[in-house]
Amino acid sequence: MIRFDALRKTFGSHQAVQSLSLMVCAGEVVALLGPNGSGKSTSLKAAAGLLRPSSGQVLIGEPGLSAMLPLARRGLSFLPQKVSFPDLLTGREVVEFYRRLRGVDPARTDQVLQVAALNGAAGRQVGTYSGGMTQRLGLAVAALPGAPVLLLDEPTSSLDADGLCAFYGLVEQRRQHGQTVLFTSHQWGDVERLADRVAVLVEGRLVADLTQRELSDRLAARGVMRLRIDACPAELLVRVQRVAPGARWALSQLSIPGSAEVRAAALEAVRSGGVEIRGIASDDGRLDLLYRDLAQGAP
Amino acid sequence: MSTPRTSLVLLVARQELLLAARSRWTQIFAAVFAVLALGVSASGYILSGGHGFQDFARTSASLVQLVTLVVPLAALLMGVMALAPERGTAELLFSQPIARRQILVGKLLGLLAALAAAEAVGFGLAGLVVFQNTGEDGAVGYALLVLGSLLLTAVFLSLAALIAAGAVGRKRARALAVALVVWFVAVLLIDLVALGVASLLPSTAASRLLILSVLLNPASAMRTGSLLAIEGTAAFGSGSLALLRFTRGTGGAAVLVTFSLVAWTVLPTLAAIRRLSRADL
Amino acid sequence: MAPVLPGNLEGRPPPSEASPLQRRIDAAEPGAVVEVEQGRYRGDLYLDRSIRLVGRGRPTLIGSGAGSVVRVRGPDVLVEGFDIDGMAGGDLAADSSGVHVAAPGVTIRNCRIGNTLFGIYLRESPGARIEGNVIRGIPGREAGEKGSGIHIWNTTGFAFVGNDIADSRDGIYVQNASGGLVRGNRARRLRYGLHYMNSDDNLFEENVFEQSAAGAVLMFSKRIQFRRNSFLHNRGFASVGLLFKDLSDSVAEDNLIADNARGIFLEGSSRNLFRRNVLAQSDTAIVLYGSSSENRFEGNAFIGNLSPLALYARRTDTKFDGNYWSDNDGPDLDGDGRSDRPYTLGSLFDHLRGNLSAADLMAQSPAALALAAAERAFPVLEAIQVADASPLARPPSLPDVPAPSAERRRLDPWGLAAALILVGGGLAVLGVGRRRGREAA
């Protein structure tokens, strides 16, 4: 379990995080979402004990210890955004070092190396690794102690296919073990696939804390369907606008914004009008627009 | 599954030693130091024109010069490089359940071991030359020189820790620059300034100023202490006597030099721990 | 350093203070040999005729404590093979000695003289020969309350050979005594090893003057020659290896002048030549006062001195030519064995040191080197330029100079073992990098 308690962090005059209160329970996988510079990494690093809160606190585990305490950090694993390792150590040496540091069973070394698909490269120095391999090694280290709280900062940003697979496996397994996972991401795909809940940060403020389902809906509601038709008689437009008020006709395209249901109804309306549909395209909503709207308090 | 604190420190120390031992910089330092030390000691005997007068005392004195120039530089640069890691490395390490001070102390110990080992090779090779030709009376002075060198390494590692505390990622370059400045100040500038100011003061005050600056500046303290140990009052002529009068004898001088070096080791380390504990990484 | 004038001449000891041997001497014919067997003879001796007093098995003469133990008043006396104990007695004003001589042609040989104010005192004793004696002063007594080891006054022609002197006031004191030879003596732990005035044309060879306030202090004399002597470890505050004051037309060749606070000190001394000497490890190799003139330094090796020259003058006509200076880094590109540019004695830093002794503490610091380098590039001092016009690029071979402390130069097995351990240990620690993470938990 992890609890942000009115966390505020300023760097000089810049307010990176403003009064963030958020709770992630055991067995929950929560994504921190937001545009660049919204305070996602700052929040996560505060949770990993790397940043000292300007005010408020981050509590880890059941009794709730401050993340600044080494004892509290026994209950968490943090994977930094651009994880790196001393070039001169082998992958195995890296894992061995952290295994000893965490006091974990020696057998875990081989297990996590295998999960991270690094057994072949474990004897090579990290300096020879590709970006994807380094990221996988980071995952291996994060997975090592099986800590109840897993904090991942942009875990998929430089992962290769092997790594993505290992990463999804890791998060799924954690969820099944009733552990807590908090990760940041830019990629809606990760969020959609993994997160139970999504917290949206914009300019250091928590602007939304929704289930993944709710957020999907909100995003979809910002979707647009574009139908290519030869012509759009006025009565057709009127009929469509009856079910989809935002529908517009322009440049031989009928654009229909709205949720999936709205779009389905509009499509039905066009069909029943007997117009031949030459092409159809559908976009989900753009995240940046959603952020903006959320920040402005729009539904 | 708790691991005792000391063993965590030792774990970090061993890791750092491993890294330092593999580092090209350590290897270069070890090689350069060995070549210079060997060169100084060999030339001391070979180039003395057969008078044997560049013998133990002066050879060791040349080694002292070498140590006071090279060791602080190596300790500062390698210390800063090792203690100001890349951001991604630092974030992973410092998010572990281990106190920052334990990481710092562990890394310092590992670095100290690596640098001491590199210096030991050089001192050993030089010693093989020196002890072919000198009686037992040199051994104590030589041992003190090695010890002094170790202390000096500790002093400048500790300063490196203070410089590097909290510097990760891009701040590294600045930390390295600061390290170079500190080296220049400690090795050269303080003495120059002290000499300059002293030349303007009346002689009692000037004398006191020079003696204080020699004791307070760790590089000078090590140089002075080692030379006094090796050569006795011959090291600085009447200056030695002025110093010994000030310190009330050789015992006092030894205590003050040791105190200076130990203080310069402990205080910057404590300050570095304090800075690091408060730093945002 | 006022001249010490001779005191009253001690005469025949009263019977209560006389040695039991006195009767045998009084009975001996001139020219006789008086052999003394092993034993301890208490009381003073008065030798007024030319006899040969020879100890067999090292008999000991123990003085009365009232004056000199052996008083030689007859010509051509020989005293040989005795241990002489002065009982720390006598009177400085009467020149009380182990052996006090006031007669020509006397030889004192192979005696061990200790616990006396003076060791051997020679007063107007031409042709004296002092050879192979070991002389010790009174332990623990202040220099001012003791006499010299060998003291000679107002004499022409003498030889001091192979004597060993320690713990007196001065080792050898020569006053108004000319035409002498001093060879192979060793003097240490004294005020001055050699104290000397108003005595011309003496020759000093292969002596060792060490561990004293000054090795040799010579004043008011001419035409002295020093060859192959060692002036070593004279290390006190303002100590000197070889001091000349008003000493002229003298030559010092092939001497070893090392580990002294100041190597050579010249005041009011002219036309002296210093040739092929080794001057090493001094705080200041040469101290030169403006009152000195026309001195020359040629072919000497200056090795490892903190500073080559302290000059107390606006200028000097002292000539330095073809010496070797170990801190001279001038190149020798034309390969003629001489540096291509003159070597300048004295730097900005030396100037500072001249005014402030604590500056010595930084004599071996990079700061001092930096000052010297900076000054070479930008001469800031209107410094008195003293230079060696053509310094040697390499140390000269000086085979006649005594080798320094040969007994110290030997292999140290423990040191070598420790050095090996250092190398091995260092390499082992650095070798942890080779073992690639294969350690068990």
Image (cartoon, coloured by chain):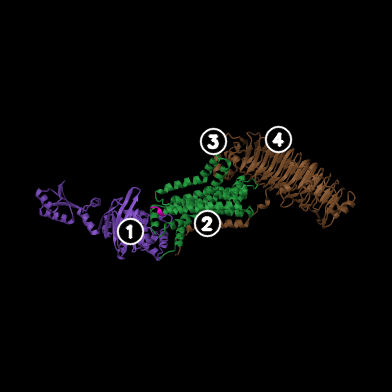
Chain colours: A purple, B green, C brown
Q: Nearer the viewer, residue B79 or C417?
A: B79
Which residue is labeled 3 in the image?
A: C378
* Badge number at residue A162: 1
Distance CA(mark 2)–CA(mark 3): 46 Å
Q: Earlier in the sequence, mark 4 or mark 2?
A: 4
Distance CA(mark 4)–CA(mark 1): 94 Å
Q: Is residue B36 visible?
A: no
Which-is-in-front pick, marks 3 and 1?
A: 3
In the image, residue A30 above or below residue C397: below
Host chain of mark 1: A
In the image, residue C345 above or below residue B6: above
Q: Main secondary structure of the magenta part?
A: loop
Q: Nearer the viewer, residue A171 or C27?
A: C27
Type of amino acid at the residue the image marks with label 3 = Phe
Task: Name the spot of residue C58 as percent of width and height, x first.
Answer: 80, 56
Q: Earlier in the sequence, mark 2 or mark 3?
A: 3
Secondary structure under the numbered disc 2 in the rendered image: helix
Type of amino acid at the residue the image marks with label 2 = Leu
In the image, residue C373 above or below residue C187: above
Which residue is labeled 2 in the image?
A: C427
Which residue is labeled 4 in the image?
A: C271
Which-is-in-front pick, marks 2 and 3?
A: 3
Host chain of mark 4: C
CB under 8 Å between discs 2 and 3: no
Distance CA(mark 3)–CA(mark 4): 34 Å
